[in-house]
Image: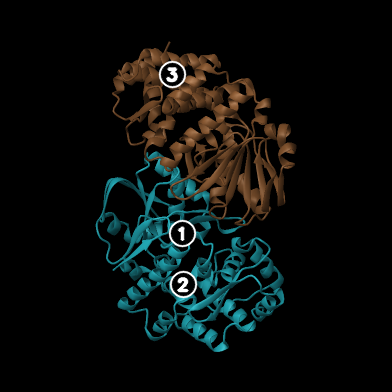
Chain colours: A brown, B cyan
């Protein structure tokens, strides 16, 4: 099946959720990937690409390499292959590969096209939609980047067959996030259906992509409702930062972050404790972590201010009012937040 | 006077050609400048900026520092000052400062606003219009960058009072370029009027900016006629590259490049020798260099292929048919080009 994306600035592209079709490009192509995914599936993908010239650049695997040095490595490869302004980069891997490939494409000769072939559940449902690209630096996550839309996204569920169980669960966390923020019916469907079935995961990917596509088309540059997609991220980013991106997968940190956000929402009287519990139960069903030990609550709180969504000395929280309906607010008192944090300082 | 820019994607901004007015911004502001311009005019500019918080980052002066390291320096300053998504960068200096400030603004938190206060004639007539930002790398000039439009450009002719004569002439070269490529009447006006008069230079800046603004509004992403603005640049970039950006100012290299392009245009029967001479005479009137000694013509030719406009194994030349009317062509035989190059291998 295909989800059609259309943005306010007239950018249009397709997200195909199906077995990979033949990709035909009358240009030079560079496939950006990492050693892990390359070992498993590069042959399969290469058989599906026809282009003037195809080369592969393999970058180190992991969030800790999502930085300007790796961007430089990708760009150097492109210059050595003499890519021109019509050339196309193909991101073949998870969210880190997608974010870096898109950012490199955005700046090579002031912008060339790129295509996504996301291989993790997380990147299939989340990172491949919306055009957010970028890298981390010592100040935090995704602080440097560009908005750059792909020309096409090809989501082949086949890649999930080799995905570690933990990474699958991390992807489910983002699916749950999408449902809680925008779609009550989808949430109820998730409570009733097991995503370990192939048919169900396809449906869930499509529903997530459609939901995100709708949000992004309303708000490409994140000036309004798109910020709600950061539900779970305000807390999640601090957790990732504190644990130096090495303990939790992004989706896992977001999972914990959603539980923290829910507790805050309950604490300020926004959401019922019962709804918060339903969300937690769904996360636990997929063994998504929901607990985290905060060592220093003051330090944790201070870390919020390094997040780019809250540099204006205000912290922006995305809190559910109900399942399927969120509020973006920067008017939460520090005391209420500290109450929640203290609950995690076992 | 004010030139109003309106781009196809609805971006709008003003270019003010007049004494600097009070700049009022209800945000944090970072002024990016270099030691040379800072020593001369920073106090003057700071007196004209009112904002929530203003800080200054001074980066090394010169084309050789137009690289990712300097971008990193600017970004680090912005992170340390905790700029948020509403903050504004102000480029205060010549084209190098403008290109780097714009590029840094394009990627800080995936894009924040920036304003231009260009201080050299070259950046006033050329670099401050069009949204091209970027840096050089070991493969060539401006090969990494972004299209990012300023929110406002303030051209204060006062800064020209301290501009070295050579830099003034380099700016005139770009003015001549604008006239030859698009505006015959303007060229004739230039033949008849001395740009050393303050009134005339204002008029020339306004005419250049208007011409470029019209071209850019037709073709923001340089898919068509905007490429004609690279007249003189195909040769000029090679000259800059061969001389490691240390012998000629950019405008000077473009001056020589225009003479080379004209000789090629004459050689292939496109332009009359008489019109080529008129252009050369105008350049010489301002002591703009028109000659260059090519040491190795084969090597010079090879260098064309490292230019980003010609990576597809074809060299794109912008050649005048008449003054005020150019043609973009990639169908010039190597032999004809070599004939011209040999003429410069004294």
Residue A249 falls in which quadrant of the image? top right
In space, the residues marked 3 and 2 are separated at their CA atoms by 60 Å
Name which residue lies at 48% across and 82% down.
Answer: B284
Residue identifier under label 3: A259
Report whether residue B249 is seen. Answer: no
Where residue A321 appears, as percent x and y from the top left, is 35, 23
The residue where tag 2 is placed is B174
Q: Residue B166, which numbered label?
A: none
Q: Earlier in the sequence, mark 1 or mark 2?
A: 1
Work out whether disc 3 and disc 1 sit on a shared chain. Answer: no
Depth check: give the residue in front, B159 or B101: B101
**In-front residue for pair B236/A206:** A206
Element assignment for label 2:
helix
Q: Are marks 1 and 2 on the same chain?
A: yes
Does residue B237 sit above or below A209 in this rendering? below
Q: Chain of mark 1?
A: B
Q: Which mark is residue B96?
A: 1
How many other residues sit within 10 Å of disc 1, few (<14), some (14-19) or many (≥20)? many
Residue at the image position 52 percent from the left and 62 percent from the top: B222
Crowding at mark 2 (Cα within 10 Å: few <14, some 14-19, many 20+): many
Left or right of A51: which side holds B321? left
Q: Quadrant of residue B268?
A: bottom right
Outermost bottom residue: B274
Question: Residue furthest toward the top?
Answer: A346
- The answer to whether A47 is drawn above or below residue B1 in the figure is above
Q: Give the quarter of the figure containing the C terminus of chain A.
A: top left
Total marks placed: 3
Q: Residue at x 56, y 28 (%)?
A: A203
Q: Where is residue A10? Give x, y as percent.
A: 47, 50
Q: Quick one: SS at disc 3?
A: helix
Asked if labels 2 and 1 touch by Cβ distance under 8 angstroms, the answer is no
Q: Can residue A118 be seen?
A: yes
């Amino acid at each position: 099946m295909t989800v059609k994306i259309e943005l306010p600035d007239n950018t249009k592209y397709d997200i195909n959720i199906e077995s990979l079709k033949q990709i035909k490009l009358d240009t030079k192509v560079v496939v950006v990937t990492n050693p892990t995914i390359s070992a498993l599936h590069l042959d399969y993908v290469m058989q599906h690409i026809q282009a003037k010239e195809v080369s592969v650049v393999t970058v180190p695997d992991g969030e800790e390499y999502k930085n300007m040095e790796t961007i430089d490595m990708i760009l150097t490869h492109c210059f050595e292959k003499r890519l021109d302004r019509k050339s196309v980069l193909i991101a073949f891997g998870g969210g880190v590969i997608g974010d870096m490939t898109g950012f490199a494409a955005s700046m090579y000769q002031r912008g060339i096209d790129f295509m996504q072939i996301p291989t993790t559940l997380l990147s299939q449902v989340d990172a491949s939609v919306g055009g957010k690209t970028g890298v981390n630096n010592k100040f935090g996550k995704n602080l440097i980047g560009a908005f750059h839309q792909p020309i096409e996204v090809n989501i082949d569920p086949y890649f999930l067959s080799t995905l570690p169980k933990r990474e699958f669960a991390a992807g489910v966390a983002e699916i749950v996030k999408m449902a809680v923020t925008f779609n009550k019916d989808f949430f109820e469907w998730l409570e009733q259906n097991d995503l370990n079935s192939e048919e169900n995961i396809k449906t869930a990917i499509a529903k997530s992509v459609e939901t995100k596509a709708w949000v992004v088309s309303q708000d490409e540059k994140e000036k309004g409702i798109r910020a709600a997609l950061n539900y779970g991220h305000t807390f999640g980013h601090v957790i990732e930062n504190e644990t130096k991106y090495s303990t939790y997968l992004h989706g896992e940190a977001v999972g914990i972050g959603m539980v923290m956000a829910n507790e805050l929402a309950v604490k300020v009287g926004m959401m019922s404790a019962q709804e918060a519990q339903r969300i937690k139960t769904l996360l636990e069903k997929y063994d998504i972590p929901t607990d985290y030990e905060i060592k220093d609550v003051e330090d944790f709180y201070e870390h919020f201010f390094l997040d780019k969504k809250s540099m204006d000395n205000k912290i922006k929280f995305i809190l559910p009012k109900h399942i399927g309906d969120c509020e973006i607010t920067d008017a939460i008192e520090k005391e209420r937040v500290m109450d929640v944090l203290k609950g995690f300082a076992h």
